[in-house]
Image: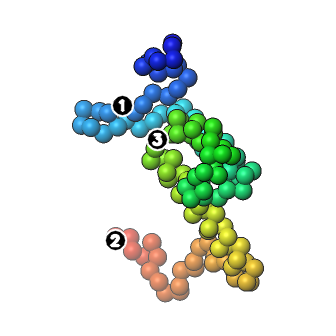
Amino acid sequence: MGFFSSSPSPSSPSSPQPTSDGAYIAPDRSARDRCYEARDAFFACLDRANIVDSLKEADKAEEACGKLERGMRKDCAASWVQYFKQRRVMEWKKQKTYEKLAAEGAEGMPETMAIPSGAPTQSSRSPK
């Protein structure tokens, strides 16, 4: 394969192929795994560089982790890349909120709620 060849390299994933109705075929398990591995490597690099939002700090992220970001763009759909970057920021903000609330003495809600006495239960609603 030459530098100007239009055929994809064997190691790169193939682009999603449209179906007859125009929708795209979802990536298979191995393609998703490659995407997740590329995402995790990129995010680990961002962590080492103390970058939370690679969208707002694009220049800094490119300088520190550009090669890994290009790898993620190669292995993941563009919409997934955008989603992963936005979700990273949302998860960081959520964690900071939990930490702030814990520092203020907030207590967590119970995982399950008790059924009030006298409330109908599944067995009392079953047909007779």
Q: Residues within 10 Å of mark 3 (few under 14, many from 20)?
A: some
Residue contact at pointers 2 and 3, CB within 8 angstroms: no
Q: Residues within 10 Å of mark 2 (few under 14, many from 20)?
A: few
Residue contact at pointers 3 and 1, CB within 8 angstroms: no
The structure residue drawn at horizontal position 53% and vertical position 85%, both measured from the top left corner, is 116
Which residue lies most toward the top here? 1
On screen, 120 above or below 11?
Answer: below
Q: Earlier in the sequence, mark 2 or mark 3?
A: 3
Q: Earlier in the sequence, mark 2 or mark 1?
A: 1
Q: Earlier in the sequence, mark 3 or mark 1?
A: 1
Q: Is residue 5 left or right of residue 50?
A: left
Residue 98 lies, in percent from the top left, at 67, 73
Picture quarter containing residue 125? bottom left
The structure residue drawn at horizontal position 42% and vertical position 31%, both measured from the top left corner, is 15
Q: Is residue 56 left or right of residue 119?
A: right
Amino acid found under the numbered disc labelled 2: Lys
Picture disc at residue 17:
1
The structure residue drawn at horizontal position 62% and vertical position 68%, both measured from the top left corner, is 94
From the viewer's side, name the closer residue of 51 and 75: 51
On screen, 78 above or below 121?
Answer: above
Amino acid found under the numbered disc labelled 3: Ala
From the viewer's side, name the closer residue of 57 and 36: 57
Q: Residues within 10 Å of mark 1 (few under 14, many from 20)?
A: few
Which residue lies most toward the left here? 21
Q: Which residue is mark 2?
A: 128
The structure residue drawn at horizontal position 57% and vertical position 38%, both measured from the top left corner, is 70
Amino acid found under the numbered disc labelled 1: Gln
Q: Viewer-nearest of labels 2 and 1? A: 1
At mark 2, the secondary structure is loop
For the question of whether residue 43 can be seen, the reply is no
Picture disc at residue 77:
3
